Image: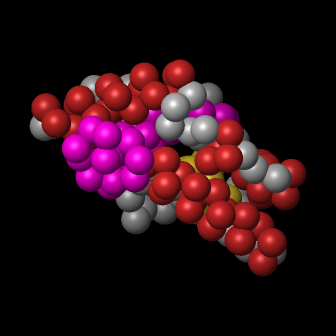
């Protein structure tokens, strides 16, 4: 993996652990979104955003979109400060999220692949995450 991405991943890891990237509004989710995540209708993606994995209400869909807009704003701010792309920050954050925040039983997606359910073991992360987590 490129040195640049590894630096972004390290920055994202520090930002995640100190709460800088996924600030409360970017992480905040209603009971409806939490329920949808628990049921496997909403999940985390390797691109750093939430995704719709099943049938959800319009309210849940709107809340997921709102959370993603807030995440994009945080990623954009961090990208500007680091001189990298928003996609790089989002992907680095996605690597960290998949490795540390997705709980067993929750769904996740790598790239355009199928939604998967996390088991007891670690998620097999994309190659670009190999040293990010």
Q: In which quarter of the image is the N terminus?
A: top left
Visible residue check, residue 60:
yes
Q: Which residue is drawn at 71% across and 71% down?
A: 61
| Depicted 25 relative to depicted 100: above or below | below
Of 2 and 104, which appears nearest the observer? 2
Farthest residue in the bottom direction?
Answer: 58
Drawn side of residue 26 relative to residue 75, left or right = right
Q: Quadrant of the C terminus?
A: top left
Q: Residue at x 41, y 47 (%)?
A: 77
For the stretch drawn in magenta, what is the main secondary structure? helix
Drawn side of residue 3 relative to residue 39, left or right = left
| Depicted 54 relative to depicted 71: above or below | below
Of 55 and 77, which appears nearest the observer? 77
Drawn side of residue 75 relative to residue 104, left or right = left
Drawn side of residue 129 relative to residue 13, left or right = left
Q: Which image quadrant is residue 5 in?
A: top left
Q: Which image quadrant is residue 13 in?
A: top left
Visible residue check, residue 116:
no
Farthest residue in the right direction?
Answer: 31
On the image, the x and y values in percent for residue 43 come to: 62, 54
Q: Residue at x 42, y 62 (%)?
A: 113
Residue segment shown in magenta: 76-104
On the image, the x and y values in percent for residue 27 come to: 65, 44
């Amino acid at each position: 993996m490129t040195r640049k991405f590894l630096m972004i991943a390290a920055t994202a890891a520090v930002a995640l652990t100190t709460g800088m990237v996924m600030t409360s509004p970017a992480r905040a989710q209603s009971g409806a979104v939490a329920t949808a995540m628990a049921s496997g209708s909403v999940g985390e993606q390797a691109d750093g955003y939430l995704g719709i994995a099943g049938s959800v209400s319009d309210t849940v869909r709107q809340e997921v979109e709102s959370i993603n807009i807030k995440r994009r704003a945080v990623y954009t701010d961090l990208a500007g400060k680091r001189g990298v792309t928003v996609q790089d920050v989002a992907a680095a954050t996605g690597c960290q999220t998949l490795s540390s925040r997705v709980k067993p039983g929750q769904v996740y997606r790598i790239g355009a692949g199928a939604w998967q359910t996390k088991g007891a073991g670690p998620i097999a992360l994309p190659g670009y995450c190999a040293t990010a987590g």
